[in-house]
Image (cartoon, helix red, strand yellow):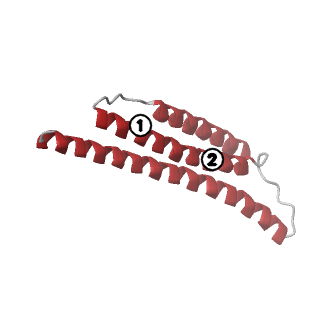
Amino acid sequence: MTPESKTNNTSNHLANERTFLAWIRTSIGIMAFGFVLVKFSLFLKQLSIVLEKKIVFPGKGYSGISGIILVAMGVLTSLFAYIRYKKIQKQINQNTFQDSSLLLSFLTVFILVMGILLIVYLIESI
């Protein structure tokens, strides 16, 4: 292996690692948003108990379910990011890199669907 190809291989591995860390940050963000949704629904329930009043919640209480789904999706994103990282690491070592957009497509569709559902939920609460 020439010094030039070794440097190129190293930069490819470092780029792969940066991409992996970006996916981890994304998954943490998704989990944090889900956690906030769940805690907010619990906060509203506790607030109604403390005030000893029946507070009418808008919609059917989908924020807790949405939050749990988002946390689960964040966990899955971390898992898929690690699998993708290891797969690309192997491909870089073998000089057989092939682009794969399955994770990107899956996450994009999921975030799009969750966003639409949250918009519908917010519209119903008005």
Residue 89, how many percent across, how many down?
35, 40
Residue 86: x %, y % from top left: 41, 41
Report the residue marked by disc 2: 72
Q: Residue furthest front?
A: 1
Q: Nearer the viewer, mark 2 or mark 1?
A: 1
Q: Secondary structure at mark 1?
A: helix
First in sequence: mark 2 vs mark 1: 2
- Measure the alpha-carbon separation of dots 2 and 1: 23 Å
Look at label 2 and name its amino acid: Ala
User: Residue most toward the left?
Assistant: 3
Q: Residue at coordinates 57% horizontally, 56% vertically from top-left?
A: 32
Identify the secondary structure beneath mark 2.
Answer: helix
Crowd band around label 1 with a 10 angstrom C-alpha radius: few (<14), some (14–19), many (20+): few
Q: Circle 1 sits on which residue? A: 87
Determine whether 119 is above or below 102 in the image: below
Please name the amino acid that badge 1 sits on: Lys
Query: Residue 28, how many percent across, how many down?
Result: 51, 54
Residue 126 showing in the rendered view: no
Residue at figure coordinates x 69%, y 43% from the top left: 121
Picture quadrant where residue 99 is located: top left
Image coordinates for residue 114, horizontal then vertical, percent: 61, 40
Camera-nearest residue between 6 and 75: 6
Q: Are marks 2 and 1 in contact (CB under 8 Å)?
A: no
Residue at 34% over, 44% down: 16
Asked whether 87 or 21 is in front, the reply is 87
Closer to us: 10 or 68: 10
